[in-house]
Image: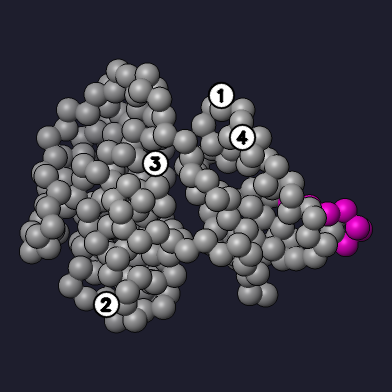
């Protein structure tokens, strides 16, 4: 289409995928998967996203990737009514000595709910890393002490870490949605980052990677480890916002 003279633009939910595909123009939004325009019934916000994507057509050539400069709006109080979360999880702690043990206990508490979720849906998105949740947890928690020299298999260490984290996030999300009530994506995000050991570990690793010598892990922390809204709420350093970014060919 571009070769025929028809300019194209798109909205991206996963920045790394867009940087790999290298489309002519893309607007990256830091929203939950499945919500490229934000929350339902917010026409003003959705219009701003759409306009930002269409404004990229003013760029005569690419590839061009820019970031939408707003986070998804916080849900109103009624949206989370009726959601129950009765799981008794270990309290997150800054003590890294027991982090792995607490994480494994947390996963054990969630396992019956995840099995219920998987049986109801007859599917799961957990498994990209090739590790069971307990093994993925041990691998991720190990980064609190040192960055391993290599990962199991042929994957680079940062890719193995990323896939393990994605599996754990999926495991937690699928488990918690088996709970009674109607949990919104915002409920799940708040619970994961404010009430779980996994969230606390990833927040620690975010800061450590950003300030560490491993360039690939630093880039992962920059864009894909912790949502920007969570960092802002915790008053932690937020990811940078380059106005324009041209991916490598």
Instruction: Label 3: state its secondary structure.
Output: loop
Measured in 3D between alpha carbons, the distance from the residue under mark 1 to the one under mark 3, in whole angstroms, is 29 Å
Of the image marks 1 and 4, the number of the one nearer the N terminus: 1
Measured in 3D between alpha carbons, the distance from the residue under mark 4 to the one under mark 3, in whole angstroms, is 30 Å
Q: Which residue is mark 1?
A: 41
Q: Nearer the viewer, mark 1 or mark 2?
A: 1
Q: In this rendered view, identify the residue nearer to me: 198 or 179.
A: 198
- State the mark number for residue 148: 2
Q: Give the vertical position of 34 relative to 68 (above or below).
A: above
Residue 5 located left or right of residue 158: right
Residue 44 in magenta stretch: no
In this orientation, does residue 163 appear? no
Of the image marks 4 and 3, the number of the one nearer the N terminus: 4
Q: In this rendered view, identify the residue nearer to me: 236 or 128.
A: 236
Q: Nearer the viewer, mark 4 or mark 3?
A: 4
Q: Which residues are magenta?
A: 3-9
Instruction: Name which quarter of the figure residue 196 lies in.
Output: top left
Q: State the quadrant of the C terminus.
A: bottom right
Instruction: Name which quarter of the figure residue 66 lies in.
Output: bottom right
Q: Which residue is mark 3?
A: 124
**Residue 101 in the image, given as x and y percentages of width and height:** 10, 56
Q: State the quadrant of the N terminus.
A: bottom right
Q: Nearer the viewer, mark 2 or mark 3?
A: 2
The reply to whether discs 2 and 3 touch (Cβ–Cβ < 8 Å) is no
Residue at 35% of width from left, 53% of height from top? Answer: 231
Q: Give the vertical position of 30 relative to 85 (above or below).
A: below
Assess disc 4: are there few (<14), some (14-19) or many (≥20) residues with their C-alpha within 10 Å of its C-alpha. Answer: some
Instruction: Label 4: state its secondary structure.
Output: helix
Residue 160 located left or right of residue 45: left
Q: Which residue is mark 4?
A: 46
């Amino acid at each position: 289409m571009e070769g025929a003279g028809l300019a194209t633009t798109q909205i991206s939910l996963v920045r790394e995928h867009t940087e790999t595909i290298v489309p002519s123009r893309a607007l990256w939004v830091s929203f939950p998967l499945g919500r490229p325009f934000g929350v339902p019934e917010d026409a003003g916000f959705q219009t701003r996203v759409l306009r930002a994507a269409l404004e990229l057509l003013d760029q005569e050539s690419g590839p061009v990737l820019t970031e939408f400069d707003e986070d998804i709006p916080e849900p109103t109080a009624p949206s989370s009514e009726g959601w129950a979360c009765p799981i008794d999880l270990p309290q997150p702690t800054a003590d890294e000595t027991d982090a792995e043990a607490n994480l494994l206990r947390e996963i054990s508490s969630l396992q019956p709910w995840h099995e219920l979720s998987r049986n109801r849906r007859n599917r799961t998105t957990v498994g990209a890393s090739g590790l069971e949740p307990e093994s993925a947890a041990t691998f991720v928690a190990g980064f609190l002490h040192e960055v391993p020299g290599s990962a199991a298999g042929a994957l680079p260490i940062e890719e193995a870490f990323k896939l393990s984290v994605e599996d754990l996030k999926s495991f937690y999300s699928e488990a918690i949605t088996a709970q009674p009530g109607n949990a919104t994506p915002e409920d799940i995000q708040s619970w994961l980052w404010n009430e779980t050991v996994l969230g606390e570990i990833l927040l620690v690793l975010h800061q450590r990677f950003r300030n560490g010598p491993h360039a690939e892990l630093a880039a992962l922390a920059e864009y894909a480890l912790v949502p920007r809204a969570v960092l802002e709420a915790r008053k932690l350093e937020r990811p940078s916002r380059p106005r324009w970014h041209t991916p490598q060919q």
